[in-house]
Image (cartoon, grey):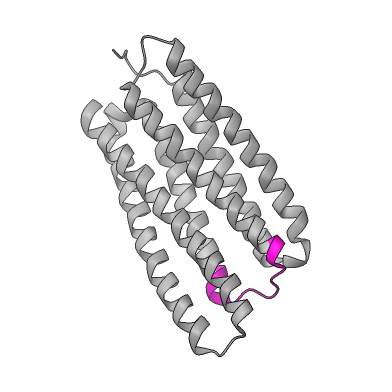
Amino acid sequence: MFGKPKANDPFFLAFIRHAEASVRAAGLLRELFDDTGRAEEFAEKIKEVEHEGDRITHETIARLRSQWITPLDRADIHTLITELDDVLDMIEAIAERVHLFGVKDPPAIALQAVKTLEESVLAMKKAVALLPDSSRRSKDILDLCVEMNSLENQADALFRTAIAELFQNGTDPLSVMKWREIYDRLEAATDIVEDVANTLEGVVMEYS
């Protein structure tokens, strides 16, 4: 059972807060890649943001268990908050690996991948912010979902190029292993953002 969507509904506010946390984390991740000498500092800040996201997720799921009337289908709420949390978890995992692996001087393509991830997270935040007004802003949300899908395609292309460069440049095996794992997670993060886009598309089609 669900009620009329309202901008101040706690579920919508939770989605927005979580997406905003991912935007902050993605910005910090970009700063980390720009200044790997401060990797530990940025990784710790991102971990704090990730903990904030965990709290939002736990509060939302607890509310979902206790609140009978919801603005969206219960399964949609659970899926969306879980996917948003997965995005933030993956950003934190990337930062942690850059710090723990002690990598320096990221390749230009790694910086491109981080910027693509940040752009996709920004589009995600904008789309989530429009969700309470989905009946009137459905086209805007769907356009942002298309943008997220396009950015995921860009991320896939960057991943393929990055892996090719990694193995073609004769880098030492340990460095290859480190960067392969970092690239895997950068690509996975944009995949999860695309999952959010697909969920938002379904919600818009169902409720608009």
Is residue 104 rendered to the left or right of residue 117? right
Task: Judge whether 174 appears above or below 154 on screen.
Answer: below
Q: Residue 28's spot in the image, x, y percent?
A: 65, 53
Comparing 17 with 169, the one in front is 169
Magenta range is: 99-111
Which residue is located at x 58 percent, y 35 percent?
53
Is residue 42 rendered to the left or right of residue 73? right
Task: Judge whether 72 appears above or below 175 on screen.
Answer: above
Q: Residue 118's spot in the image, x, y percent?
A: 52, 55
Q: Is residue 158 visible?
A: yes
Q: Residue 182's spot in the image, x, y percent?
A: 56, 65
Task: Judge whether 168 appears above or below 32 on screen.
Answer: below
Q: How many marks?
A: 0
Is residue 202 rendered to the left or right of residue 155? left
In which image quadrant can residue 51 be found?
top right
Which residue is located at x 43 percent, y 78 percent?
161
Location of the N terminus (image quadrant): top left
Q: Is residue 208 visible?
A: no
Is residue 176 rendered to the left or right of residue 71? right
Comparing 127 with 26, the one in front is 26
Which residue is located at x 63 percent, y 73 percent?
106
Residue 105 colored magenta?
Answer: yes
Location of the C terminus (image quadrant): top left
In which image quadrant can residue 29 be found?
bottom right
Q: Residue 203's spot in the image, x, y percent?
A: 28, 32
